[in-house]
Image: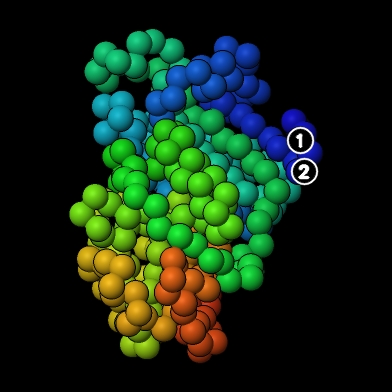
């Protein structure tokens, strides 16, 4: 088990210890995609959605796929070497060859990384700011993360906790590594536009419908924010992290709204890997 200062780290590529050549390929070729999830007692919420995300993105980026059965098997194998509760990241990349040549004959590799689990408990409400930015191929959870990291750094240099991206047309899109949810007292709204359809967002939407709460996806601009009582970030670490403010708009965040979100999330079933 490889170790780093924050705790445990275990990595396998195609079910084996990574070679220097494999790690060099991952480090210098910024073309691939991944998904991240929390594992508890070898179970995952939305595992089928994570596997489908990897399959769809592989077809789009590589015209090939490692196969969901293989990916699931490799995750299960890696979990046998670690504790039952971990944070897992599954990455897909081309192990060799010229990836600028579009061909289905590609040597796809699956890297499974396990690290310390992250509690789903929300942190102190975040203050976030808007930054003009549109991720390339925003519907994919791809490895090209420089832009979003620069946005987060810019936000934090101004004293904020994180950044929300605004597109060139003024639409509020998504957070740096999370989806934005808004509550008006009756309905949860997810901003519409070029963004990543997060697995946690999808699962929380299903859970809200299960408990009888309406959701919608619609365009949101800055002028709309004052109409919402609560705002939250939704991602693999936390389904509903409260936002205290976005730019100069503050949110009341009534406790009942987050009790509702917690109830919806608790209704999402676990799947055994």
Task: Tell me if residue 19 comes above or below residue 206 in the rendering.
Answer: above
Task: Tell me if residue 26 comes above or below residue 235 in the rendering.
Answer: above
Element at label 1: strand
Tag of residue 239? none
Does residue 50 appear left or right of residue 194 in this picture? right
- Which residue: 67% across, 53% down? 117
- Which residue: 54% across, 22% down? 27
Camera-nearest residue between 255 and 127: 127
Give x and y (percent) for residue 175: 43, 56
Residue to which mark 1 is pinned: 4
Q: How crowded is mark 1: few (under 14 residues within 10 Å), some or many (20 or more)?
A: few
Circle 2/circle 1 CB separation < 8 Å: yes
The mark tally for this picture is: 2
Q: Residues within 10 Å of mark 2 (few under 14, many from 20)?
A: few
Q: Which colour scheme is used?
A: rainbow
- Which residue: 39% across, 69% down? 181
Element at label 2: strand
Answer with the quarter of the image where residue 75 lies: top right
Does residue 116 appear left or right of residue 182 in this picture? right
Give x and y (percent) for residue 32: 41, 30
Give x and y (percent) for residue 194: 26, 51
- Which residue: 31% across, 38% down? 136
Examine the rendering and report whether any part of residue 256 can be seen: yes
Does residue 30 appear left or right of residue 84 in this picture? left
Camera-nearest residue between 15 and 93: 93
**Quarter of the picture holding the N terminus:** top right
Give x and y (percent) for residue 115: 67, 43
Residue to which mark 2 is pinned: 7
Examine the rendering and report whether any part of residue 49 can be seen: no
């Amino acid at each position: 088990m490889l170790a780093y200062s924050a705790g445990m780290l275990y990595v396998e590529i195609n079910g084996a210890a990574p070679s220097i050549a494999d790690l060099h390929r991952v480090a210098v070729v910024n073309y691939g995609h991944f998904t991240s999830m929390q594992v508890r007692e070898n179970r995952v919420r939305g595992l089928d959605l994570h596997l489908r995300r990897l399959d769809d993105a592989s077809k789009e980026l590589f015209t090939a796929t490692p196969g969901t059965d293989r990916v699931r098997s490799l995750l299960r194998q890696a979990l046998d070497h670690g504790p039952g509760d971990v944070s897992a990241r599954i990455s897909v990349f081309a192990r060799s060859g010229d990836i600028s040549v579009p061909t289905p004959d590609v040597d796809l590799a699956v890297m499974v990384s396990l690290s310390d689990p992250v509690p789903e408990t929300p942190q102190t409400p975040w203050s976030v700011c808007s930054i003009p930015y549109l991720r390339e191929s925003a519907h994919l959870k791809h490895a090209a993360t420089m832009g979003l990291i620069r946005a987060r750094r810019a936000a934090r240099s101004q004293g904020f906790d994180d950044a929300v991206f605004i597109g060139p047309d003024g639409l509020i899109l998504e957070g740096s590594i999370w989806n934005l949810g808004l509550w008006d007292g009756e309905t949860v709204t997810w901003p519409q536009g070029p963004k990543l359809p997060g697995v946690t967002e999808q699962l929380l939407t299903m859970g809200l419908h299960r408990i009888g709460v309406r959701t919608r996806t619609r365009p949101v601009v800055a002028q709309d924010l004052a109409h919402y009582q609560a705002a939250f970030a939704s991602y693999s670490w936390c389904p509903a992290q409260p936002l205290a403010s976005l730019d100069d708009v503050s949110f009341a965040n009534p406790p009942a709204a987050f009790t509702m979100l917690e109830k919806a999330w608790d209704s999402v079933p676990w799947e055994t890997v």
